[in-house]
Amino acid sequence: QVQLVESGGGLVQPGGSLRLSCEASGFTFSNYAMSWYRQAPDKGREWVATAPRQGGYIVNTDSVKGRFTTSRDNAKNTVYLQMNSLKSEDTAVYYCKTVINSRDFWGQGTQVTVSS
């Protein structure tokens, strides 16, 4: 079965960096785009970035452009979210997601807290 497991979250000071990982299993990872979303307290889930299956990345320009990037390692079935210059408003639970046959699959999420 499809499984997505995020890791790498934690507490970081403003201006700091974190790298999240999402390890996938149960499907042919290299065939599918992988996306990152986040959900802050009392807010809806927000798209953050996507790593297309062919490489490169796309980010939400309004909120994270110039600070976040995403990349994938198809040999490790893993997608990463590199987060730099973190701000308090980046505090959220971060999820990875893929879509297979029109069905969304989500990981369990990892908490990122940006605070001094």
Image (spheres, helix red, strand yellow):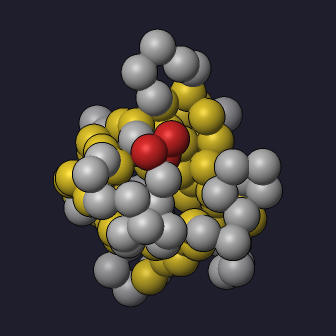
Residue 99: percent from the left, percent from the top? Answer: 59, 43
Q: Position of residue 74 (x, y in %)?
A: 45, 80
The quadrant where residue 47 appears:
top right
State whether residue 106 is above or below residue 56: above
Q: Is residue 92 left or right of residue 5?
A: right
**Would residue 60 be visible to someone looking at this image?**
yes
Q: Residue at x 26, y 51 (%)?
A: 116
Residue 45 picture location, percent across and down: 56, 27
| Residue sitting farthest toward the front | 116
| Viewer-proximal residue among 101 and 75 | 75
Residue at 46% across, 60% down: 86
Identify the residue shown where x is 60% and y is 69%: 67
Total marks in image = 0
- Residue 53: give x, y in percent of width and height: 65, 70
In the rendered image, the residue lying farthest to the right is: 61
The reply, left or right, for residue 3 in relation to residue 15 is left
**In the displayed structure, does residue 61 sit left or right of residue 10?**
right
Q: Quadrant of the N terminus?
A: top left
- The residue positioned 38% from the left and 85% from the top of the image is 75
Residue 92 as seen in the image, left or right of residue 58: left
3, 60: nearer the viewer: 60
